[in-house]
Image (tube, rainbow, N blue to C red):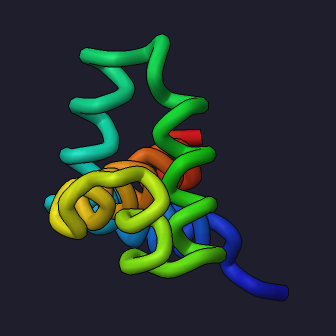
Amino acid sequence: MADTSSDVAAAGSFLESLMDTELYSIGAFFCDEHPDLVDEVVARSEDIERRGLEAHSADAGSPIEESFETLLTGLAVRYYKAVAG
């Protein structure tokens, strides 16, 4: 029979390592500072994923760097929410 206490400890250690990343920090900060915008930034980032940076940027009439920042923020929020639960 497997030693579940060591499995739990390993999982906990792994989750802690996921929390010690820049992407996690960005997501946590955004969720804490702008909870009312979380759903919107995730939806926009998913749209950018589907359509691509250039197409989204052209349609939005905004610089491609802004679309990239939105994409990255949305990914960070999703990462944070997945790890934090």
Asked whether 57 or 72 is in front, the reply is 57
Q: Count up the numbered dots.
A: 0
Q: Quadrant of the N terminus?
A: bottom right
Q: Position of residue 10 (x, y in %)?
A: 46, 73
User: Which residue occupies 76% across, 85% down?
Assistant: 2
Q: Residue at x 45, y 22 (%)?
A: 37
Residue closest to the eye, 8 or 63: 63
Quadrant of res 68: bottom left
Q: Is residue 60 above or below residue 85?
A: below
- Rendered residue at 32%/43% (across/down): 27
* Viewer-side residue, 21 vs 30: 30
Name the residue at 36% across, 64% down: 57
- Above or below, comparing residue 85 to residue 50 in the picture: above
Instruction: Pick whichever, 65 or 71, lies toward us.
Output: 65
Could one spot residue 21 in this view of the protein? no
> Which residue is situated farthest in the bottom direction here?
1
On the rendered structure, is 38 left or right of 68?
right
